[in-house]
């Protein structure tokens, strides 16, 4: 199926836009993570939505799913090389968000629960 985009921003937003994908990539930037840990880190996501977004990111070549043949079953997700290239972009987005909050809400009306920079 051929996709048509109006510009490159649409491509990026198609791949990592929405409520969950960029946050999943953000957390995977630290290294491989098991499904249960991702569920805990991505606050508010349902198991069904997590699995759906992980499948989409895997299909798009941004993450790798590694299943280990053991009992109990173990599955880890990690960024591909191409997915890893998004870490710098997300770091810049986080920095921009910090700056925006400092300038727009100088009296501390916004709280970021977890600051993390790789």
Image: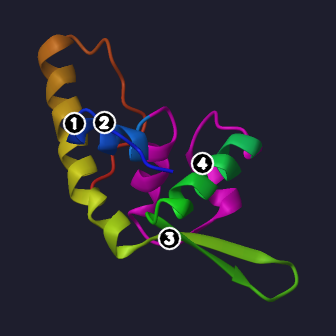
Residue where numbered disc 4 is placed: 53
* Residue found 49% across the figure and 32% down from its top: 19
Tell me if mark 4 has few (under 14), some (14-19) or many (20+) residues whose alpha carbon lies within 10 angstroms of its own: some
Disc 1 to disc 2, how far (Cα)?
6 Å
**Vertical placement of 90 versus 112: above or below?**
below
- Find out whether residue 36 is within the magenta segment: yes
Disc 4 to disc 3, how far (Cα)?
14 Å
Frontmost of labels 2 and 3 is 2
**Vertical placement of 71 versus 49: above or below?**
below
* Residue found 82% across the figure and 88% down from its top: 70
Q: Position of residue 16 (x, y in %)?
A: 41, 45
Of 27 and 58, the residue lying toward us: 58
Of 12 and 105, the residue lying toward us: 12
Tell me if mark 2 has few (under 14), some (14-19) or many (20+) residues whose alpha carbon lies within 10 angstroms of its own: few
Dot 1 and dot 2 residues touching (CB under 8 Å): yes
**Secondary structure at numbered mark 2:** helix
* Sequence-first tag of 2 and 4: 2
Tell me if mark 1 has few (under 14), some (14-19) or many (20+) residues whose alpha carbon lies within 10 angstroms of its own: few
Frontmost of labels 2 and 4 is 2
**Secondary structure at numbered mark 3:** strand
Residue where numbered disc 3 is placed: 78
Dot 2 and dot 4 residues touching (CB under 8 Å): no
Frontmost of labels 3 and 1 is 1
Can you tell which mark lies on residue 7?
A: 1
Of 88 and 111, the residue lying toward us: 88
Tell me if mark 3 has few (under 14), some (14-19) or many (20+) residues whose alpha carbon lies within 10 angstroms of its own: many
Disc 2 to disc 4, how far (Cα)?
18 Å
Disc 4 to disc 1, how far (Cα)?
23 Å
């Amino acid at each position: 199926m051929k996709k048509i985009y109006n510009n490159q921003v649409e491509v990026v937003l198609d791949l990592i836009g929405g409520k969950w994908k960029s946050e999943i990539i953000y957390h995977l930037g630290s290294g491989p993570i098991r499904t249960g840990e991702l569920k805990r880190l991505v606050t508010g996501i349902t198991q069904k939505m997590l699995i759906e977004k992980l499948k989409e990111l895997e299909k798009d070549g941004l993450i790798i799913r590694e299943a280990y043949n053991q009992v109990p079953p173990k599955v880890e997700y990690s960024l591909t090389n191409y997915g890893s290239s998004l870490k710098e972009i997300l770091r810049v987005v986080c920095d921009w968000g910090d700056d925006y909050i400092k300038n727009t809400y100088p009296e501390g009306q916004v709280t970021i629960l977890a600051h993390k920079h790789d």
